[in-house]
Image (spheres, grey):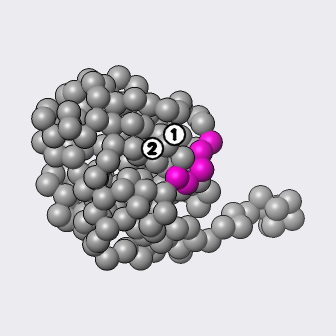
Amino acid sequence: MFKKLFGKEKSITNEKIVSPVTGVVIKIEEVPDPVFAQKMMGEGVGVQPTNGIVVAPVDGEIIQIAEKSKHAFGIRSALGQEILVHIGLETVAMEGEGFKTLVKLGDHVKAGQPIIEADLELIKEKAASTVIPVVVTNSSNNEYDFVWTEPGNVTAGETVIFETTAK
């Protein structure tokens, strides 16, 4: 009741999540890592990147940055989704080599804003895969319905990879 009186209720009911990188979107089940493919981290998709500029997939707050390894970041959207963007597989072992963070924890960012620059050639050489899982880590709370984009070419900051509606 008070939320309605004072305008604190969430006014947003759906969001469009754009690709964090230019490349080819694939189904999460096709990500070559069982933790992601079996949705242990949450619902999502993978993107096979064609360049290393990784952008925010949605307007929101940076709630996680892998400080030492720089291989992943988390963003909380206005709808409350907590989205993990994990650059490559087995990249934590690179200990930050080949990654440059462009934002810091707590920053508010806009969809399409560059977050991390990654050296794809170095990732190909030193990690298991360059695939970038994009996962809603709080999807198991069953608060959202998702509509997934069909696999195909995507452009960073432009192509919608999924839409989310609050239940």
Residue placed at 38% from the left, 48% from the top?
85
Q: Amino acid at mark 2?
A: Gly
Q: Nearer the viewer, residue 25 or 165?
A: 25
Q: Which quadrant holds the N terminus?
A: bottom right
Label 2 secondary element: strand
Using residue 127 as the reference point, say whether residue 3 is left or right of it.
right
Residue 60's spot in the image, x, y percent? 58, 49
The verdict on residue 62 being magenta is no
Picture coordinates of residue 75 (x, y %)?
50, 47
Q: Position of residue 7 (x, y in %)?
A: 82, 62
Residue at numbered disc 2: 74
Magenta span dominant secondary structure: loop
Label 1 sits on a secondary structure element that is strand
Residue, x 37% and y 74% (percent of image)? Answer: 148
Q: Pointers 2 and 1 in contact (CB under 8 A)?
A: yes
**Is residue 106 placed above or below 44 in the rendered structure?**
above
Residue that appears at 48% across and 57% down: 157
Q: Amino acid at mark 1?
A: Ile
Label 2 to label 1: alpha-carbon separation? 5 Å
| Residue placed furthest toward the right | 5
Answer whether residue 141 is visible to the viewer in this image. no
Return the x and y of residue 16 as percentages of the image width and height: 52, 68
Q: Is residue 121 above or below residue 15?
A: above
Question: Is residue 110 among what the camera can see?
Answer: yes
Which stretch appears magenta? 108-112
In the drawing, what numbered circle is on residue 63? Answer: 1
Number of numbered callouts drawn:
2
Sequence order check: which comes first, mark 2 or mark 1?
1
Q: Is residue 137 above or below residue 119?
A: below
Residue 2 is marked as: none
Q: What residue do we see at 66% from left, 67% from top?
A: 12
Q: Residues within 10 Å of mark 2 (few under 14, many from 20)?
A: many
